[in-house]
């Protein structure tokens, strides 16, 4: 997977883009879609659960919005979403990776950005547990190999 890094970085009040984890969860959110924006509250809970379980994972969000300040004041305040993100108003992440199908706009990547697991938790809620289980397994294997 190719992660555009030349996009504007928006500080959303957390360190979700930093850290030394070998694993990344990447997702694209259409900021013009109210249902997609509402799903950000699900991400807040997911990130909290992953952190409470002690798993290491970097979260990267690409959000399509023309005005990041308005998006932060409206959508992020409404959902309680407090993560750093990239403004992707030209949908670079989607176009570069040919991910036009909404069901595949979330992925778990390794340190070389190869896909370990792909699929949107919004479309298949059971994927949330699969992502958690996979992260737990990958992190435990990492500890053993060190």
Image (cartoon, rainbow, N blue to C red):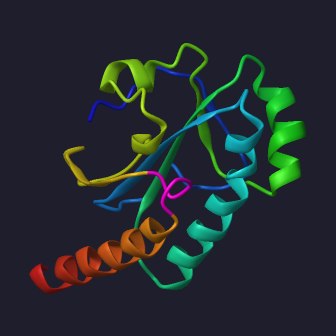
Q: Quadrant of residue 141?
A: bottom left
Prevailing secondary structure class for the magenta stretch in the rendered image: loop
Q: Quadrant of residue 19?
A: bottom left
Q: Which residue shows up at 44% across the image and 57% down it? A: 58
- Quadrant, the N terminus: top left
Q: In this rendering, would 77 be left or right of 101?
A: right
Residue 135 shown in magenta: no
Identify the residue at image location x=36%, y=60%: 20
When the figure is inspected, residue 20 is found, relative to residue 75, above or below; the finding is below
Using the image as rendered, state which of residue 17 and residue 105 is in the foreground. Answer: 105
Q: Which residues are magenta?
A: 120-124
- Residue 86 appears at what percent x and percent y? 57, 32
Residue 61, x across and y down, in percent: 54, 42
Q: Position of residue 129 (x, y in %)?
A: 44, 76
Above or below, 88 against 101 in this view is above
- Was residue 122 drawn as part of the magenta stretch in this picture? yes
Give whichever of 30, 89 is nearer the camera. Answer: 30
Residue 135 is left or right of residue 28, and the answer is left
Q: Is residue 11 left or right of residue 99?
A: right
* Residue 113, above or below 82: above
Residue 26's spot in the image, x, y percent?
43, 46
Residue 9 sits in which quadrant? top right
In the displayed orientation, state which residue is furthest to the top.
90
In percent of the image, x 29 and y 30: which residue is there? 2
Quadrant of the frame with the C terminus = bottom left
Q: Residue at x 72, y 32 (%)?
A: 33
- Does residue 72 sit above or below 106 in this rendering? above
């Amino acid at each position: 997977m190719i992660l555009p890094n030349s996009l504007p970085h928006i500080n959303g009040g957390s360190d979700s883009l930093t850290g030394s984890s070998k694993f990344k969860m990447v997702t694209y959110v259409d900021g013009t879609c109210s249902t997609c924006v509402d799903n950000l509250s699900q991400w807040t809970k997911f990130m909290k659960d992953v952190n409470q379980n002690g798993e290491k994972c970097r979260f990267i969000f690409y959000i399509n919005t023309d005005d990041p300040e308005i998006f932060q004041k409206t959508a992020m305040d409404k959902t309680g979403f407090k993560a750093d993100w990239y403004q992707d108003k030209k949908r670079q992440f989607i176009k570069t990776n040919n991910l036009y199908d909404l069901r595949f706009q979330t992925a778990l990547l390794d340190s070389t950005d190869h896909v370990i697991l792909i699929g949107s938790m919004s479309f298949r809620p059971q994927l949330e547990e699969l992502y958690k289980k996979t992260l737990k397994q990958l992190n435990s294997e990492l500890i053993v190999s060190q």
